[in-house]
Structure formats: C-alpha cells, structure tokens
Amino acid sequence: MRFKNLYYGLFLILSQLLFSQDKQLVSDISFEGNDSVSSAELRSILLLKLPVFFVRDEFTPKKLNRDKIGLIAFYKSKGYLEVQVDSKITNISDEYVAIQFIIKEGNPYTLKTVKYFGNKQLSDEDIAAFLQLSVNNHYNPVHFKNQLKELKRVYLRRGKLNISIMDEVTVDGLNIHSRINISEGITYFIDSVYVTGLELVGEKYINREIVFSPGERYNIDKIDESKRRIFDSGMFSSIEIIPRVGVDKPGKVDIEIKVREYKSSSIEANFGFRELSAFQDNLSTTGVDAQGRWILGNIFNTSSNIEITGRIASDINLNLINDNPLVERDFSIVYRTPWTLVFRLPSRVKYFYIQESENHNLIRNGITYSLHFEPSRNTRYEINSTLEVLRSSDTLFTTEHTEPSRWINLRYLSNQIQNPLAPTGGDYKSLSATLYGTILGGERHFFKVESEYRKFKNISSGVIAFRTALGYIYNLDKRYELPAGYRFRLGGQTSLRGWSKPEDFENPNGDLISDMVNLEFRFPIREKIGGELFFDAGRLYNTPDKFLSTSLSWDIGFGMIYNATLGPVRIDIGFPYGDLNMPQPHASLLYMF
C-alpha cells in the first residue's frame, strides 16, 4: 500500500483526461430495412461500435461515412447491386448519440452464366476451376474482378507478356451473364538481361540474386522474386525490372534491371521504447533506449556492411522507486553479408561488450557468429554460436569472479503480428534450443529449450491477447547446481504481475522448468487512452515428474494504457491469488507481449 497516494493522484489525472473533453459518444446503433442480413452481422463490420461495459466509442462524421461505404460494399458482395444506405442521427443528450442506418436493399442479382472466348493455352475447365465463380449464386463484382486479376497473373507466369482479359456483363432481369474475352498473345522468352544505374557496385552482386536467365520463358513470379532479393541485399534504394519488347525480335523480350545505389554510409541516433533482455532471463522487460549507430555500407563495393553501435537503456517499473533499475550499456561491432561462400545464406559476426543488471555487476564480453535463413518475410531460422566471458560479483549469475561461457543456439521464429506496437491480430511463434558447454568448453554444461506462442484476436470491443511460454533446462553437470541467473524465474511486470519482481516471488531463485499463461482483454476508452483486464498464471519446478503435483501461482488485475507517440505507456495493478487487499502496482512501457 506504499503507492496509495501515488495511485490516487494518477486516478485523478486520468479521470480529468477521460471526462474533460467535449466529445459525442455512441449510445446505440440500429438498422432499418435489413431484411436479408441480421443486425448483429452488420454491426460486426462497422467502425462505430456499441457500448461495452463502461467503454463508449467516439462518434465522428468520418467514421459514419466510412461505415456507410462499408455497408454498401458488403451488400454488393452479396449481389445487392442497387443497395442504398442512409443514416439518421439522434442526440440522446449533449454527450450521447443514437445512430440508425436506413437500408434499401433492392433485389439480389444472380450470376447465371460465364463463358470464355479466346483462351487457347488454358481450357474452359482450367479457368473455371481457378476463378471459382459460383454460377446460380449471388453475383459478387469485387470478387469477380479480383479473380480476373489473378487469372492475368497465371498467364504472366506462362510467358504471355501481352495478355489482355476483358469482362463483358449482360443484365437480364436479375440475372447476370458474363462473357470473358481473353487475348493471350504470343509466348515470350528472355533474350538478354542488362543492368543500368550502377556506379560503384559490381554487376556480379546483382547477377547472383537473379533467379531467371536468358533463354527461359518469361515468368512474373521469378521477376518479382529477383527484385525482392536484389533489394534485400541492402545495396540499393530502388529497383525496377522492366521488360523491353522489340519489334524486330518476335517472341523475345529483353529485361532491364534499373537500380539506384544506396547511400553507402550513415550516422544515426535513435531514442525510443524497446524490449530489454537481462542475461539468460526467460522473459524480456521493457524500457527506454538511446543509441548511436555508424553504418559502413557496401564494404569494398560488395553487399557486406559493418555496423558500430553504442547504446544505453534502462527499464521502467515502479520498483525503481526503491530499487535500482535494470540498466544496459553496450558497445558492438557487427559485420553482415547476405551470402556465405557461394550460398545465399545471410551471416553475421558480432563482437559485443555489455554491462548490465541492477547494480552494473555483470559484464559480458564476447563474439557471436550467426547464420539465418528467411523463407518469407515473417519466418526466420537461426544458428548462433557464442564465445563469451562473464565477469560478476553477484552470485545470481556466477559463483566465480570470471567465468567463460560457450554455447550454440538453434532458433525458429514466425511473426505474423499485425501492428507490433499495439497488436490487433495475428500470432507469434518461437522455439529455441541451446547447448552450453560440453564439447564447446566453458564452465557451465546444460541444455535449454524455450518456446513461446502469442495470439491476438480483434473483436468488436477490443483485442483479446493470449500468450503461453514454456521452458526446460537439463543440467548435464550434476556436480554443481546452476546459479539463479541461468534458471527460469517468474514474478514482475513481464510475467506474473501479482508480484513486484522475481526476488519477491514464491521461488525467488528460479528453477529448471517453467510454464506460464497470460490472458488480456485490451479495450479503447477515449482517443489515446485504453484499459486492460488480465489474468496471469505460472509455475516453477525442477523435474518433469512434478508436472502434476506443482501448484499454480496466479493473479488477476487491471491496467490503464496511454498510447504515446513512441508506444504504449502502461500502469498495471495485479492481485496475487485474487486477493484485493494485496495490490501490486507496475508502471512500464509497451504491452507486456
């Protein structure tokens, strides 16, 4: 209760922010004339939302107009091509309004027939199977046009550079008859490939990224993939790949790759919110970060670069009132190249010097070699090998003043999160396995597996966020117990918010096995202010046979969120085991996950 007066003050400030502004809020949303679609289904596509508990959506004419457009598009997708949508606004009071959408649906149109003309390379059956147009069902003009665009791309994969597809629609009462006219043109093959715009970079660094070659059939997918690979090399600020068709070479196309070389070197300074990871901690914390970076690009006119970075960062939590915050100071030199020998396998060599922990009593000095493979922009595989030396006077990390550490790590990461600073949808998956010591040498010998899964679901009144994290350590050297700094720990604003920090948790020294679940409901309140309700649960134990017998530690709580320019600022209050007489406050940056 030592923060009682502080929270009374914060409550008064937030109350003023919430209720002092002259805004109109949505009290009710109703529909008239929606005979074929339920009101619940129509509400689900609106930007304006009905009140939920104490949450009220702000009314603006812009939102209203966008919702009217959205309703029209929705009805047309169901075949109601003549739909009309109007609205009526009723002022319940100076603060609240009721909205009624008045809908004139009209009659639904049916796609009766689809006929194809001019197609030679693809049969009618092949095209029909690809387009997936439901004859004798409602006519969806948007879906129809999108499918025709995809059909054009099918032809572009087959060398039909001059493909033309036109759709003629005939209306017979409430029936739609479609005639798709296809002019395939001739098949083009690549004659020559040349590069323009180069000044310093060698042409071979472009040629090795190209996945097509002279003599083969033109394929739009290979063109796009080559463009992506060239851009990902980091050597160019813009890339265009232009097919050049000459009248004197029928069936032949020249490919021009037009590039603009990237600024080779830059000096940057950044300040913002970011995740901070303490040494061997199973979950990251958040804080403020300031860094300066010097990038030397295109080393020796190649796609390699060197990055020199110095930074200082500190976590933010109410515990810093009585305790020293986690502070990181580090310096690193990183060499990157998108190719490893003759393979397009990006690699990185990093030298680092890191000083961290609450009392700056841990120094890490070492080098890491990394290989990573990215089959897509959202998926990544890594292999990391590290040799470092730890120096510490804190037995949380090591029992000796100096300790060598050697480890190799395999990691899989899939990040499909929409809007990472304030997630609104998607999921995140990570799995890593790390071997310490043994044949690698060093003082510690153990095997560590960690996994994490996050899922975000956008609903009408907010976002449901879910996370589960699992960890397992097998100590290969039974003569010694692992220091607490290597173990999994729980408690604090990054895991179980019913406890102030890991040292105050029921198992302050951590353990070899951890499982945890976090569930949050995040909702908007007004403009940049939001709220959240949460539930956290987790356990620590040392052997798999205690999986069923280990009791669960849990908490519930609520929080307030201010969406600042740099990211969310959070105030959470957790109650261990639901005990309302034992509130545990936290102040932090960004969402917990």
Image (cartoon, rainbow, N blue to C red):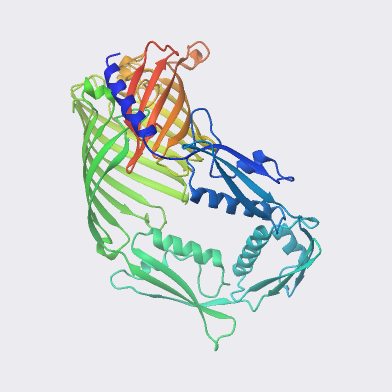
- Residue situated in front as seen by the camera: 205 or 291: 291
Question: In the rendering, at what x and y percent does residue 197 appear?
Answer: 35, 74
Query: In the figure, residue 314 lies in which quadrant?
Result: top left
Residue drawn 35% across the image and 25% down it: 493
- Residue situated in front as seen by the camera: 582 or 215: 582
- Residue situated in front as seen by the camera: 98 or 492: 98
Residue drawn 62% across the image and 62% down it: 150
Question: In the rendering, at what x and y percent does residue 312 appear?
Answer: 21, 38
Query: In the figure, residue 494 lies in which quadrant?
Result: top left
Residue drawn 60% across the image and 76% down it: 162
- Residue 376, compared with residue 325, is above or below; it is below
Q: Is residue 397 visible?
A: no
Question: In the rendering, at what x and y percent does residue 253 appear?
Answer: 53, 79
Assign the C terminus to one quadrant of the image.
top left
Q: Is 273 situated left or right of 546 in this image?
A: left
Question: In the rendering, at what x and y percent does residue 90 appear?
Answer: 56, 42
- Residue 109, compared with residue 250, is above or below; it is above
Residue drawn 35% across the image and 64% down it: 237
Give the residue at the far bottom of this rendering.
248
- Residue 348, compared with residue 227, is above or below; it is above
- Residue situated in front as seen by the camera: 281 or 15: 15
Q: Is 59 situated left or right of 590 in this image?
A: right
Q: Is 268 situated left or right of 234 in this image?
A: left
Assign the N terminus to one quadrant of the image.
top left
